Amino acid sequence: MKNSIQTSHQPLPDLIARFKVKRGLFRTEKVEAKVYALDQHTCIFKTDKLFNPGDTLLLDLVMTMPFENVDASALSALITERKKHCSNFFYLVDFIDFGSRSANATQNRLERICRILTKKQSLRSRRNRATAGLKQSA
């Protein structure tokens, strides 16, 4: 993924980012954001919450699967870029702090999510090509 916000028009299938935003001294708000790009080092998601480059988030990536969801929890993410789109913002974040043992397990789960996404996107593009071929021959 490039170090700039360039997104597809569609979010990644079955993947969301969850994080908490402080709202006052004793209140936090749980936020779910659609993910538009992901690799082992960076992520792009879209939300209406306002953050600045240099802010850090603790986020969870959750992929919905038929039998058991796959997640990578407590990822430390540094916001490196923000791009306004209508009333929302796209954020490019870099994952940080993969040095400890527990972080290594989280890194493995993140890699698993990336592998599953690659397979899902490959299957989806083959399915789209097959249906396009059927429409043309009809």
Image (cartoon, rainbow, N blue to C red):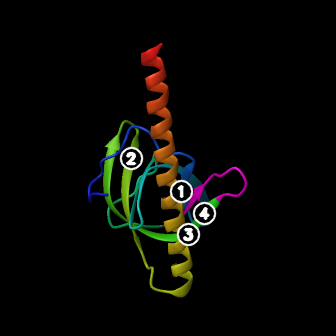
Which is more N-terminal, label 1 or label 3? Answer: 3
Inspect the magenta stretch and tell me whether residue 59 lies in it: yes
Q: Residue 89 carries which label?
A: 2
Per the image, the residue denoted by label 4 is 71
Q: In which quarter of the image is residue 20?
A: bottom right
Badge 4 marks a residue whose secondary structure is: strand
Per the image, the residue denoted by label 1 is 116
User: Are the two marked residues, 4 and 3, in contact with CB atoms closer than 8 angstroms?
Assistant: yes
Badge 2 marks a residue whose secondary structure is: strand
Q: Which mark is residue 109?
A: 3
- Residue range in magenta is 58-69
Observer able to see residue 16: yes
Distance between the alpha carbons at the discs numbered 3 and 2: 26 Å
Q: Residue furthest top?
A: 138
The amino acid type of the residue labelled 2 equals Phe
Residue 69 falls left or right of residue 135: right
